[in-house]
Image: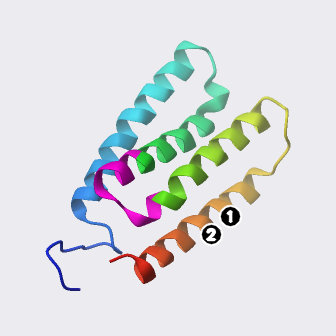
Amino acid sequence: MSGTHAKSFCCTSWRGLCYWGAAFLILYAIGLGLAIWLHAQAYQLAVLFAALGLACIANFARNRTFHCVITGPFFLLVALAVALEKCGVWKVGMGFVWVIVAVVVAVALVLERRFAS
């Protein structure tokens, strides 16, 4: 690849990975703390996906990471689906959710590899 920004993992820079990781850890810690404080530990998986999605959105805003345009909103939708499943509004198998998450993340990374500069 040519250009001024060397990218090491897929098309994501190490700076982007570190920023996303720090944002995720902070958001996840806050979310888990709130879940424990509100006695809502059953929603830990929804908190995980919400933190993943918000970290992706923050990473896109800061580093313009291509796949985060896809994964950020997707993770937030998964967080909503998991929360609705936990409170009994919607029934979905978590095995199915994990398969869909893996497929969407893989497709997002392939699209980034193919189309992002």
> How far from the left and from the top, in percent, is residue 46?
62, 37
Left or right, residue 106 beside residue 91: left
Circle 2 residues within 10 Å: few <14, some 14–19, many ≥20: few
Residue that sits furthest to the left in the current view = 4
Q: Position of residue 107 (x, y in %)?
A: 56, 73
> Residue 62 lies in magenta, yes or no?
yes
Q: Position of residue 67 (x, y in %)?
A: 45, 64
Q: Which amino acid type is shown beneath numbered disc 1?
A: Val
Name the amino acid type tagged 2.
Val
Question: Cα distance, mark 1 to mark 2?
Answer: 6 Å
Q: Is residue 28 left or right of residue 5?
A: right
Looking at the rendered structure, the secondary structure element under dot 2 is helix
Foreground: 82 or 113? 113
Q: Which mark is residue 103?
A: 2
Q: Quadrant of residue 45?
A: top right
Which quadrant is home to the C terminus? Answer: bottom left
Q: Tell me which residue sits at (48%, 40%) in the image.
A: 51
Q: Relative to 59, is 104 on the left or the right?
A: right
Would you name the residue on which mark 1 appears? Answer: 99
Q: Residue at x 41, y 30 (%)?
A: 29
Question: Compared to 114, does 37 lie above or below?
Answer: above
Indicate left or right for 73 with 91 as reference: left
The residue under the point 41% across, 34% down is 27
Of labels 1 and 2, the one closer to you: 2
Q: Which segment did they paint magenta?
A: 58-68
Q: Is residue 84 magenta?
A: no
